[in-house]
Image (cartoon, helix red, strand yellow):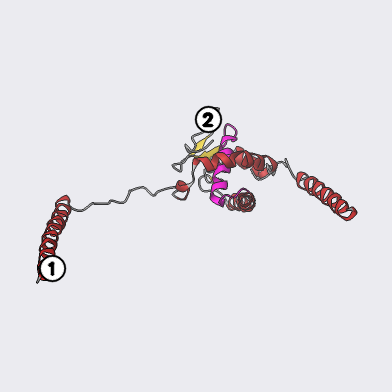
Amino acid sequence: MNTVFTRATWAVSAAALALTGLAAPAFAQRDPAYEAARQAGKIGEKPDGYLGVVGGGDAATKKMVDDLNIKRRALYAQKAQAANATLEEYAMTAGCLAIARTAPGEKYQTPDGNWQTRTSAPPVRDPRCP
Amino acid sequence: MNAGKLTNRASLSHKRRMRKARTVLVAMVGSGLAAGCISVTAPDKPIVIELNINIKQEVIYRLAPGAQNTIEENSDIF
């Protein structure tokens, strides 16, 4: 009985530790270069849940977008598995939400592939978006 | 003798049925030919986001609350 209790206590404290550990990097700020590129309209949100380079784009911008998309993909994969969904389903859901939270002046891609500048009006999104 | 009669009668009706089936088949082929070929033309614009077409709205609605949290908790990459 004592052993069970000890084990349970350990499990609870381990869970608590894991939670605080996960919560630590949460609500982190965007990298200044990323924030600037978004505001300048060099980078936009795509309906598939990833970032895209608007227009030509320089090597540094492309590299930044690739890095961020790799991180996003890893995150989507992990969350999709936990939610019993496919990577594409989770990514598209995140894309819907990411486009919805773009600030006026930032770029986003419409379902037909055109880049639009976000205004105060609701963005043009896939009809399946929540 | 009796068995032969029965066999003959059976085969006769069978033949009749076969003939009917053949008529139906000919009619079907005939109408198929009359309708002509179905022409399929490729779209002049490339199809974008074809992969997402199978994603159901209900799945997106189910995932949305969790995805919203994911975005907020990882706002450095969103």
Q: From this viewpoint, is residue B45 visible? A: yes
Residue A43 in view (yes/no): no
Answer few, some or many: residues within 10 Å of disc 2's Cα (few below 14, many 20 plus, some between 14 and 19).
Answer: few
Q: Secondary structure at mark 2?
A: loop
Q: Is residue A97 above or below residue A18?
A: above
Q: Nearer the viewer, mark 2 or mark 1?
A: 1
Inter-mark Cα distance, 2 to 1:
79 Å
Q: Is residue B10 magenta?
A: no
The three-letter amino acid code for the residue at tag 2 is Pro
Nearer to us in this view, A112 or A31: A112
**Residue span colored magenta:** A83-106
Q: Give me the residue at 54% from left, 35% from top.
A: A130
The residue that mark 2 highlights is: A122
Please state if A71 lies on the left or on the right of B53 as rendered. right
Instruction: Looking at the picture, tell me which residue is in the foreground, B57 or A88.
Output: B57
Residue A128 shows which numbered tag? none
